[in-house]
Image (spheres, helix red, strand yellow):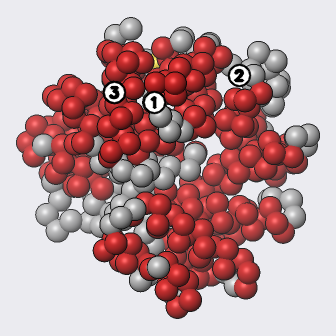
């Protein structure tokens, strides 16, 4: 397949929990004129052309730093735009260019880079890239595996079983391969996959069956958690944005593990609707059935804000809570900070110092 085929595959990872972005964006004192032009445009194609101008002028590293501090929203549209950077890096440096990618905007640069590699070099090339992902940082392999899942669906022309089997084959070539992230990417691509501007007619979706494709007997059991981790999105679309109906549909899932995963997806579906508002987080999560589900929805929204690069709202959400729920919130936030910063103790301290609770602040620094 031609490499260009893959450049139109959006990895709308705001719907999953992406794991590694180091800085919250602030507006630079001297914004790049290309970025200011991008903000006035509505066409992704035209925005990509401006972004290419910036790439050629200052290079991929500086471009990514300018973009992450541009004030542009952490949305699926911006994620897709950043794919342009991954495309550019691959074209300029080949498989050795992975180190030029930053894990900003849900690792969009990594996603595009991987999809290009898959198109040109297949599984052997992907195994080589996965080795580089292991070196790049603690959260990067999961993003690389997720991007692989998206690419495998297109490669197999929307045959989900064959795409999932490609995840397994890549795992055989790559030690410590995060299989779930690849499976998750496969099913996410089935929902959002776009080629030449329109969703593929070959996607495994039935308008009259809210649990399809997770109830398709062709899909082996070991892949179903990845399926249910995206199913609430399809249910939400079926009910035309009715969150309560979506919650009730998740309640009706018979398998308790998949019921939990469906609710997790619902919480991540809610996240982009909250617009950084603590009140919206609480009100939208109130559609969940029971206090435990509502509390879990709030906690998932906190980690979702962290995963898309927000370094303010997660702390505010935890501060707004009380009692045991606040303790759980800070504990999860500490886990995200530790995972992301790895051995970068200075960056860990910077984030830990934002925690208002002295007990949890000290725990974070340990």
Of the numbered discs 3 and 2, the one sitting upstream in the chain is 3
Q: Position of residue 249 (x, y in %)?
A: 85, 43
Which residue is under mark 3?
128
- Is residue 264 left or right of 81 when viewed as pictured? right
Q: Is residue 205 visible?
A: yes
Q: Could you tell me if the residues under marks 3 and 1 are in contact, i.e. CB atoms within 8 Å?
A: no
Question: Is 34 or 114 nearer to us in this picture?
Answer: 114
- Picture disc at residue 220: none
Nearest the eye: 88 or 334: 334
37 displayed left or right of 122 = left
Q: CA distance from mark 3 to mark 2?
A: 33 Å
Task: Residue at 53%, 20% (x, y): give it.
Answer: 169
The crowd level at tag 3 (other Cα within 10 Å; few <14, some 14-19, many 20+) is: some
Question: Which residue: 10% across, 46% down?
Answer: 58
Disc nearer the start of the sequence (2/1): 1
Q: In this rendering, would 322 be left or right of 80?
A: right
> Which quarter of the image is occupied by the N terminus?
top left
Instruction: Give residue 205's mark.
Output: 2
Residue at image coords 47%, 79%: 366
Q: How many marks?
A: 3
Callout in the foreground (3, 2): 3
**Residue 42, horizontal then vertical, whole percent:** 36, 40
Q: On residue 174, which mark appears?
A: 1
Q: Residue at x 47, y 34 (%)?
A: 175
Could you classify mark 2 by the number of other residues whose Cα lies within 10 Å: few (under 14), some (14-19), or many (20 or more)?
some
Distance from the alpha carbon under mark 2 to that under mark 1:
31 Å
Pointer 2 with pointer 1, Cβ within 8 A: no
Residue at the far bottom in the pictured view: 358
Above or below: residue 113 compared with residue 30: above
Viewer can see residue 246: no
Tell me how far mark 3 sits from mark 1, CA to CA: 9 Å
Look at the picture and state if 288 lies above or below 96.
below
């Amino acid at each position: 397949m031609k490499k260009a085929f893959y450049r139109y595959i959006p990895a709308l990872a705001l719907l999953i929990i992406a794991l590694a972005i180091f800085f919250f964006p602030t507006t630079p004192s001297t914004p790049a004129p290309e970025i200011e032009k991008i903000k006035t445009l509505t066409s992704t194609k035209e925005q990509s052309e401006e972004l290419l101008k910036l790439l050629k002028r200052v290079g991929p590293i500086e471009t990514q730093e300018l973009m992450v501090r541009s004030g542009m929203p952490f949305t699926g549209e911006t994620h897709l735009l950043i794919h342009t950077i991954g495309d550019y890096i691959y074209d300029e440096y080949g498989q050795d260019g992975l180190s030029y990618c930053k894990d900003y905007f849900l690792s969009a640069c990594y996603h595009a880079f991987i999809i290009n590699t898959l198109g040109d070099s297949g599984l052997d090339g992907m195994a080589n890239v996965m080795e580089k992902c292991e070196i790049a940082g603690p959260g990067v392999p999961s993003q690389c595996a997720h991007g692989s899942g998206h690419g495998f669906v297109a490669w197999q022309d929307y045959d989900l079983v064959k795409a999932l089997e490609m995840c397994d084959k890549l795992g055989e070539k790559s030690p410590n391969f995060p299989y779930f992230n690849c499976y998750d990417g496969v099913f996410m691509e089935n929902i959002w996959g776009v080629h030449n501007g329109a969703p593929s007619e070959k996607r495994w979706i039935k308008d009259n069956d809210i649990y399809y494709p997770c109830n398709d007997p062709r899909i082996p059991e070991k892949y179903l958690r990845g399926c249910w981790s995206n199913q609430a999105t399809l249910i939400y679309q079926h009910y035309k944005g009715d969150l309560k109906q979506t919650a009730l549909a998740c309640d009706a899932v018979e398998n308790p593990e998949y019921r939990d995963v469906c609710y997790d997806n619902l919480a991540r579906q809610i996240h982009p609707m909250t617009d950084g508002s603590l009140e919206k987080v609480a009100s939208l999560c109130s559609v969940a059935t029971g206090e435990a589900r509502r509390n879990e929805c709030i906690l998932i929204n906190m980690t979702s804000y962290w995963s898309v690069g927000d370094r303010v709202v997660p702390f505010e959400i935890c501060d707004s809570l009380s009692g045991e729920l606040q303790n759980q919130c800070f504990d999860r936030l500490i886990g995200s900070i530790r995972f992301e910063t790895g051995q970068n103790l200075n960056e860990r301290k910077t984030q830990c110092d934002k925690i208002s609770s002295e007990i949890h602040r000290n725990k974070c620094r340990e």
